[in-house]
Image (cartoon, rainbow, N blue to C red):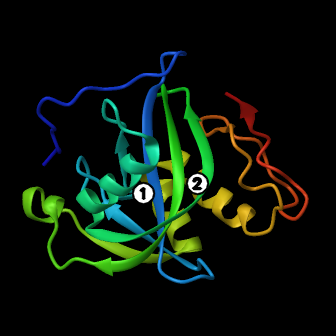
Amino acid sequence: MVKEKPNSTRIYDKDGFRRRAACICVRAENEAEVLLVTSSRRPELWIVPGGGVEPEEEPPVTAVREVLEEAGVVGDLGRCLGVFENNDHMHRTEVFVMNVTQELDEWEDSRSIGRKRQWFTIDDALSQLALHKPTQQHYLMQLQLSKTLENANTPGRVVNATHPPILTNAASATASPTTA
């Protein structure tokens, strides 16, 4: 079943990209596991929870709202990993890290479309995302890099997730973001 939102208005930036926000949900400080949810279009596949920015809403608010709707979790919003650009679908997604403090037994999407959630190791999550949402793999790569880079929270970072740079040395490489 595909999730439809009646009266939903899509918000676009000055360049014509749809504005989105998402959260990489973690449950421990070491960030070794992340929470994925089943896709509304293909429920056998897993995705990072996130969605469109609503009118008069800032991306951090969108990210928190979307993980509550899609994953049924609440927590503390942490650092921003950057803005990930997808040229194929013409959207830019601002991605945050959320430290999950509570998992609800039932939530909006579990009731309405049967959505499920599951914790994965980073490696397993990367494998799952490769099957359906390969651009979302770059969110997790940036999560890993941001743990070791001093400048991981630089405002205005845009990472092209459609054609990302090849990272050869995680200790010294940056995601080669462009400035929005």
Point out the tag, 1 or 2, that comes first from the N-terminus.
Answer: 1
- Residue type (three-letter) at the residue carrying disc 2: Tyr
Residue 114's x, y, as percent? 13, 63
**Residue 11 quadrant:** top left
Seen in the picture, residue 85 relative to 111 is either above or below; the reply is: above
- Judged from this view, the residue extending furthest toward the front is 56
Badge 2: how crowded within 10 Å, few (<14), some, or many (20+)? many
For label 2, the residue is: 139
Label 1 to label 2, Cα distance in Å? 9 Å
Which residue sits at x=26%, y=51%? Answer: 42
Left or right: 33 in relation to 145: left
The answer to whether the residue labelled 1 contacts the one labelled 2, judged by CB atoms less than 8 Å apart, is yes
For label 1, the residue is: 48
Left or right: 76 in relation to 52: right
| Quadrant including the C terminus | top right
**Residue 108 quadrant:** bottom left
Give the number of the disc on residue 153.
Answer: none
Which residue sits at x=59%, y=82%? Answer: 29
Residue 142's x, y, as percent? 67, 56
Which residue sits at x=17%, y=45%? Answer: 3
- Residue type (three-letter) at the residue carrying disc 1: Val
Seen in the picture, residue 115 relative to 135 is either above or below; the reply is: below
Which residue sits at x=16%, y=38%? Answer: 5
- Judged from this view, the residue extending furthest toward the right is 172
**Residue 155 quadrant:** top right
Residue 75's x, y, as percent? 40, 72
Residue 148's x, y, as percent? 80, 68
Q: What is the secondary structure assignment of the residue under circle 1?
A: loop
Left or right: 90 in relation to 67: right
